[in-house]
Image (cartoon, rainbow, N blue to C red):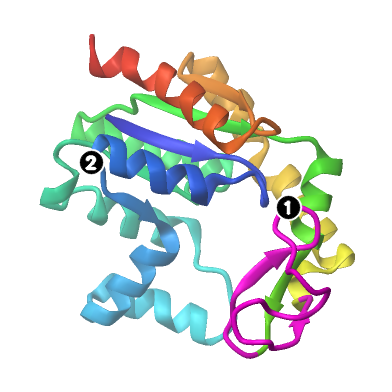
Amino acid sequence: MRIILLGPPGAGKGTQAERLVKKYNLPHISTGDIFRAAIKAGTELGKQAKEYMDRGELVPDDLVVSIVKARLTEPDTAGGYLLDGFPRTKAQAEALDTSLQELNTPLTGVINIDVAQEELLERLTGRRVCRGCGATYHIKFNPSTVRSVCDKCGGELYQRDDDTIETVKQRLEVYHRQTEPLIAYYQQQGILHSVDGAQEIDEVFQEIVQFLDKFVNS
């Protein structure tokens, strides 16, 4: 089972990915993890990626695809995998398709977790982090007992710079411009399944499982 997980920031991809890899015993592959592993291992691709990252530049698509392709040939992916955070652009998706054709390992399906913009803004801007122990809260969904005070260590809760309304809107704009076109791309291939991410976490998970179980049991 070879799956891609799509969705905007705040859609809950991380939560669902954690559950899915456990249920189906799949390796969870994210570009961040791949880069860190390649750099730590000192591979040639890892060295090239590090040069761009050290300069604060985006890693070029061809290099990203090469690193992902190398990861998808490792032994633990023989039974499938869950790709999270890649592809991010149509160009990356097309390059991935070419690589998978070469490997004769087509995608099983693409899960798109769909959440309205207003809901995403509420989720992302409501996060608070403890300065003392790093515990995370949400002013609506997971508030601390005492406002702005951590339940665990009594530290001050604060809003990170990347959780401000201005930064969140920018992140969502980048997603809509670069990654949202992948929804139509995979829809045309007939392998996209969209899920209402505004539902409870368990409901989202069960809907995804219902879709994926068709492939497990076929």
User: Where in the figure is residue 83, as x and y percent of width and height?
Assistant: 39, 45
| Residue drawn at 74 percent across, 45 percent down | 177
For label 2, the crowd category at 10 Å Cα-Cα, with few meaning under 14, some 14 to 19 and many 20 or more, is: few
Is 186 or 216 nearer to us in this picture?
216
Residue 150 falls in image quadrant: bottom right
Residue at point 59%, 46% (across, down): 12
Q: Is residue 102 magenta?
A: no
- Left or right relative to 42: residue 148: right
Spatial CA distance of label 1 from label 2 is 29 Å
Residue 134's x, y, as percent? 59, 81
Label 1 secondary element: loop
Q: Which residue is mark 1?
A: 141
Q: What element does badge 2 sit on?
A: loop
Look at the numbered discs 1 and 2 and tell me whether their residues touch, using CB distance below 8 Å: no
Whole-percent x, y for residue 101 in the image: 27, 30
- The residue that appears at 73% across and 52% down in the rendered structure is 141
Residue 210: give its label.
Answer: none
Q: What residue range appears in magenta?
A: 132-159
Is 30 placed above or below 205 here? Answer: below
Indicate the quadrant where residue 22 lies.
top left
Quarter of the image where the C terminus is located: top left
Give whichever of 73, 116 is nearer the camera. Answer: 116
- Disc on res. 25: 2
Give the percent coordinates (x, y) of residue 195: 60, 25
Residue drawn at point x = 42 percent, y = 42 percent = 95
Q: Is residue 149 left or right of 89 when viewed as pictured?
A: right
